[in-house]
Amino acid sequence: MVVHLTERQASILRCVTEWIAEHGEAPSVRETGERVGLSSTSSVAYQLRRMERPG
């Protein structure tokens, strides 16, 4: 199954991957939002849920 990510979702995925490489654990929703330019934690959580559904 091919999963197509939006530009924002790809940015969040890059952020999470880089953060894990730097810190050894996943970033919080707030930390993710700060790095990708989203001030609303609910917006970050929404994007993460959308990415999680297809795998």
Image (spheres, rainbow, N blue to C red):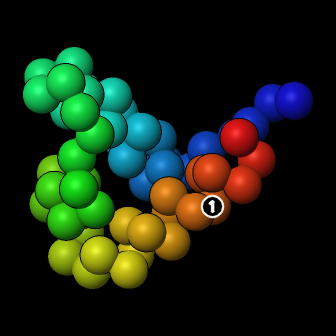
Vertical comparison of 42 with 13: above or below: below
Name the residue: 12% across, 22% down: 22
Quadrant position of the N terminus in the picture: top right
Occupied quadrant, residue 41: bottom left
Q: Quadrant of residue 43?
A: bottom left
- View extreme (top): residue: 21
Tell whether 12 sits left or right of 46. Answer: left
Viewport quadrant of the C terminus: top right
Residue drawn at (42%, 39%), measured in percent from left and top? Answer: 13
Front residue of this view, candidates 15 and 55: 55
Relative vertical location of residue 26 with respect to residue 36 in this rendering, above or below: above
Q: Position of residue 29 (x, y in %)?
A: 28, 62
Q: Residue at x 19, y 24 (%)?
A: 24
Residue 37 appearing in the image: no
How far from the left and from the top, in percent, is residue 39?
Answer: 19, 76
Q: Which residue is mark 1?
A: 50
Q: The residue under label 1 is which amino acid type?
A: Arg
